[in-house]
Amino acid sequence: MNASATPVSSPSIASADAADRALRISESRYRRLFETARDGILLLNADTGQIEDVNPYLVEMLGYSHEEFLGKKLWEVGSFADIAQSKEMFAEVQASGYVRYEHLPLRTRAGARVDVEFVSNAYYVEGLRVIQCNIRNISERFLAAAEIQNYVAQLRTAVMSTVEVATTISELRDPYTAGHERRAAGLAVAIGAEMGLDGRRLEGLRVAGYLHDVGKITVPAEILSKPGTMNSIEMQLIQGHARASYDVLKSVAWPWPVAEIALQHHERMDGSGYPQG
């Protein structure tokens, strides 16, 4: 019976017991997820910013004990010692209920750098607004990305070195125009920069400038170095270098139209150039 002597039915008691058991199971599952998660988790009081709880993974990641986190505000923990940024982050999640940093550098207690992805959102638990911060260690991913960037830079340097070697070989066969390719490349890049072209397109202009005359390797050296006027056959052989450059370069999967530039570099606006004019 209840206080008013009204009998309480067995189904009501059973229902309450079932609800209580379901709640305990849910809490147990959440706690297990919280304790075993392979991301760091912080729970903050949404009003004060004080840390209410922290999971073992974050303790392990940053090197501070569980007790050193509890009761402190986010910006009072050494890893989050950038006070201005931490307060700004807290204010943002207070206002919007969500904040995300794809890359946030932190420091462990020992001073080592840890690169993390930081996602924070606010929600209510039994009428109390809390902020949950999920902190994922992306140091290996960040290091891998840096290594890839370094590799790409090395590869770009190697490509340009190869391009310069090809240019040098071409110049050795045609000493009268030695330096022409480098000057053409520099001029093309300067014009492109004035036009506002981005770095990727400027790099393409540089490569095309260096290689546009590579087809001269198909022209006999005695014609390239011949003093005086050339006859019509010799001129045809010289003019064939544009097509030859195209044929040499077209098999390379350039990210720019290098072969087409080489093919067209003697064409004129009025259609009187070669080889298609």
Image (tube, grey):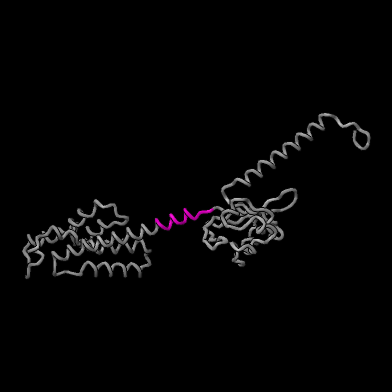
Residue drawn 28% across the image and 59% down it? 159
x and y percentages locating residue 120 in the rendered image? 61, 54
Vertical comparison of 229 with 29: above or below: below
Spot the residue most to the right. Answer: 5
Between 232 and 145, the residue placed more toward the observer is 145
Between 69 and 236, the residue placed more toward the observer is 69
Among the 4 quarters of the image, the one containing residue 18: top right
Q: Is residue 241 visible?
A: yes
Among the 4 quarters of the image, the one containing residue 190: bottom left
Q: What is the quadrant of the C terminus in the image?
A: bottom left
Vertical comparison of 110 with 58: above or below: below
Q: Is residue 62 magenta?
A: no
x and y percentages locating residue 241 in the rendered image? 16, 59
Residue drawn 38% across the image and 63% down it? 198
Q: Is residue 121 visible?
A: no
Q: In this rendering, would 131 be left or right of 207?
A: right
Residue drawn 6% across the image and 64% down it? 231
Q: How many marks?
A: 0
Among the 4 quarters of the image, the one containing residue 205: bottom left
Q: In this rendering, would 205 be left or right of 235?
A: right
User: Does the magenta stretch mainly form a helix, a strand or a loop?
Assistant: helix
Q: What is the quadrant of the N terminus in the image?
A: top right
Vertical comparison of 189 with 123: above or below: below
Q: In this rendering, would 63 be left or right of 214?
A: right
x and y percentages locating residue 154 in the rendered image? 33, 60
x and y percentages locating residue 167 in the rendered image? 21, 63
* Magenta stretch, residue numbers: 137-147
